[in-house]
Amino acid sequence: MSMGLGEMLTGILVFALLFLVLREFFCWYWKINRVVALLENIEAKLSADTE
């Protein structure tokens, strides 16, 4: 039962697509993107304050 090159590439492509979709879902679910944006905003305000 050896896999052909086409089957292997299809498997890798499906895995990569699934990974990207799940990553985006979990970042949305736990609001990671929003937290990062807020922290960057806080950092920008603090660095503007100290200058």
Image (cartoon, grey):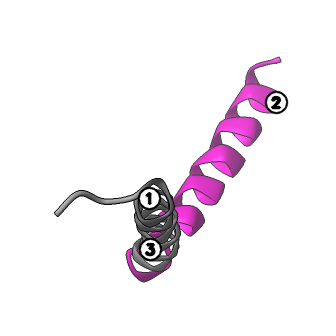
Q: Earlier in the sequence, mark 3 or mark 2?
A: 3
Is residue 44 magenta-colored?
yes
Q: Residue at x 46, y 80 (%)?
A: 25
Left or right relative to 41: residue 28: left
Vertical order, 22 against 36 (above or below): below
Q: Residue at x 16, y 63 (%)?
A: 1
- Locate residue 41, reporting x and y percent: 71, 50
Q: Residue at x 66, y 45 (%)?
A: 40
Q: CA distance from mark 3 to mark 2?
A: 41 Å
Residue 48 disc label: 2
**Displayed quadrant of residue 50:** top right
Residue count near mark 1 (Cα–Cα under 10 Å), binned few <14, some 14–19, many ≥20? few
Left or right relative to 41: residue 22: left
- Most extreme residue toward the front is 1
Q: What amino acid does circle 3 point to?
A: Leu
The residue singled out by tag 1 in the image is 12
Is residue 28 magenta-colored?
yes
- Most extreme residue toward the top is 51
Q: CA distance from mark 3 to mark 1?
A: 10 Å
Which quarter of the figure is the C terminus placed in? top right
Residue 25 disc label: none
The residue singled out by tag 3 in the image is 18
- Locate residue 20, reporting x and y percent: 51, 66
Residue count near mark 2 (Cα–Cα under 10 Å), binned few <14, some 14–19, many ≥20? few
**Displayed quadrant of residue 3:** bottom left
Left or right relative to 14: residue 34: right
Tally of marks: 3
Return the residue nearer the eye: 27 or 10.
Answer: 10
> What predominant SS class does the magenta segment belong to?
helix
Q: What amino acid does circle 1 point to?
A: Ile
* Residues shaded magenta: 27-51
Q: Secondary structure at mark 2?
A: helix
